[in-house]
Amino acid sequence: MKKIILAVLCCLFASSLWAQGRLIGRVLDENSQPVAGATVSVSGQTAMVAISNAQGYYVLLDVPQGSYEIKATKRGKPVWRGSITIAGGVTQRIDMKLGDKSENLAAAKPTAEAKKAKVDKPKKEVKKEEEEEEEKPSTVAPTVVASTQDLAKEKELQKAIQESETLNQLDAAQTELPETDVEIVGGIEAIQSKIEYPMSLKRAKIEGTVVARVFIDEQGNPLRISLIQPANKFLNEEVIRVLTEEAKFKPAKVGNSPVRGAITIPVKFKIQ
């Protein structure tokens, strides 16, 4: 009986892994230079965030299959937006170029029928449709990575993937518990004081609590964020903004040595 139960559990675990995909890539600026510290987030049935490393690479592991909005941000630079469908058991790559409109909002070339339809319409209607189309995120056609041999061609990307896998292991079972946990400089009050309640949600009386799991490196910089309890999309985005741009952290320590660690942070949105 024990063998049967173990076999069933193994099958369920394998099927859950197959129902997840991986998203990897690189964030570049308008001059095709790598952007370090950029926030890459996917939002849909779940919300996940990765921070690009010094070479601009980002890695999101164990993303449940489904359709997502994807966004890359860096303070002082234009926002990159798109959409993607994650397939189970598949690694997909998207390289993002901040400030490059052709890659940010590029759409398929209009067909002859579409062009003719625009000619027959008043100019005001055509202009309005074009503006609405500009506001929509593009559907990105990612490159599917077939094997680890392809990844090995970019050693820094392979290194980023290994580091992300290490974070997963750290979160699953931390073998060496730190003597001092990760701390928020100024405490949770410092986080709440930086939060800007979206006015449209405030008027609609939409409240919620976002619970984020933040992974911190040895220097106190965020490496990755998982929203273990997401709320409204715009509340999620505000929490991500504050945690990546405003918050300061003290790393965990073993003895006197800083080590990587994680902290769970609840952020409340409540109308007074």
Image (cartoon, rainbow, N blue to C red):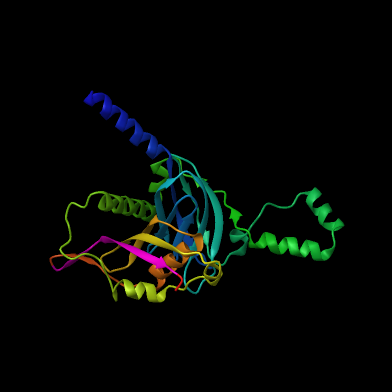
Q: Report x, y in % for residue 55.
A: 40, 62
Report the residue at 26% width, 49% height from top: 172
Quadrant containing the C terminus in the rendered view: bottom left
Q: Is residue 30 left or right of residue 90?
A: right
Q: Is residue 110 above or below residue 220?
A: above
- The residue that appears at 71% across and 52% down in the rendered structure is 109
**With respect to residue 78, does 10 lie above or below?**
above
Quarter of the image for the N terminus: give it.
top left
Is residue 263 shown in magenta? yes
Position of residue 20 measured from the top left corner of the image (x, y, whole percent): 42, 42
| Left or right: 36 as drawn, with respect to 172 | right
Residue 93 shows in the view: yes
Looking at the rendering, the stretch of residues picked out in magenta corresponds to 256-270
**Based on the displayed image, in which of its 4 quarters is residue 191 positioned?**
bottom left
Where does residue 171 sit, x and y in percent of width and height? 27, 52
**Which one is in front, 28 or 172?**
172
Task: Work out whether residue 36 can be spotted.
Answer: no
Which SS does the magenta portion mostly show? strand
Q: Is residue 54 magenta?
A: no
Q: Residue furthest front?
A: 272
Q: Quadrant of residue 99?
A: bottom right
The structure residue drawn at horizontal position 30% and vertical position 32%, both measured from the top left corner, is: 9
Which residue is nearer to you in this view: 97 or 238? 238
User: Against 266, is 94 above or below?
Assistant: above
Question: What is the residue that sits farthest to the left in this orientation?
Answer: 255
Q: How many marks?
A: 0
Residue 95, position as x, y percentages in the image: 50, 56
- Hey, which residue is sitting farthest right in the picture? 120
